[in-house]
Amino acid sequence: MGFEEQIMDEMKTAMKSKDEAGLRGLRAIKAEIIKAKTDPGANGILTEEVTLKMLQKMVKQRKDSLDIFKQQGREDLAVKEQEELAIIEKFLPKQLSEAEIKAIVADIIAQVGASSVADLGKVMGVASKQLSGKADGKTISAVVKELLTK
């Protein structure tokens, strides 16, 4: 079963069980799928790589909105964002822990031969590719900076 079919099945289940939060999150994913399929050059095909990037972008947007809503004391909106975030994250691969990220980044630093914060770009390029879909870019960046400043 393809990703799009899986989303449609989940939507049907959410409708039947009257799960408003789940349905809202799934509809957001469906809207992004349609947008991605109609992008120039996509030819109506949704690759796994495009799907992964799309979901990561959605998660990042929800986290940013969640932070803003919490800062502004808008708990009602923060709850909605949190619910959608949980639905979207179900479709992403398991995220690595910070300890796992540190071990991988330490190996990358050794491979690249980085020794200072000036080599941040080199390390981030390799780390972003290697950890794509498995870790948040913000977390990767923080770990790289931490390890390069030691």
Image (spheres, grey):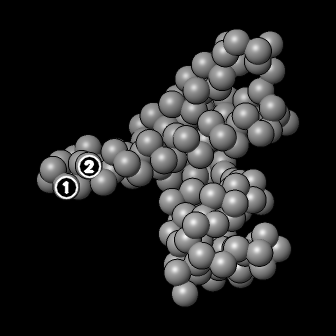
User: Is 106 drawn above or below residue 20 in the view shown?
Assistant: below
Residue at which label 1 appears? 71
Q: Is residue 53 left or right of residue 49?
A: left
Up the image or down, 126 lies above or below 50; here it is below
At 30% from the left edge and 54% from the top edge, which residue is drawn?
Answer: 67
Q: Quadrant of residue 41?
A: top right
Closest to the observer: 112 or 54? 112
Residue at the image point whose x is 55% and y is 71% from the top: 117
Looking at the rendered structure, the secondary structure element under dot 1 is: helix
Q: Few, some or many C-alpha atoms within 10 Å of disc 2 (few <14, some 14-19, many ≥20)?
A: some
Rendering coords of residue 66 (x, y %)? 33, 50
Q: Secondary structure at mark 2?
A: helix
Q: Residue furthest left?
A: 73
User: What residue appears at the point 37 percent right and 48 percent down from the top-left corner?
Assistant: 64
Q: Is residue 23 above or below residue 82?
A: above
Give the CA separation, mark 1 to mark 2. 5 Å
Residue highlighted by disc 2: 68
Residue at the image position 52 percent from the left and 81 percent from the top: 149
> Horizontal and vertical percent for residue 114?
70, 74
Residue neighbourhood size for the residue with mark 1, other residues' Cα within 10 Å, grouped as few (<14), some (14–19), many (≥20): few
Which residue is situated farthest in the bottom direction here? 150
Question: Which amino acid, mark 2?
Answer: Ile
Amino acid found under the numbered disc labelled 1: Gln
Asked if the residue at tag 2 contacts the one at tag 1, i.e. Cβ–Cβ closer than 8 Å, the answer is: yes
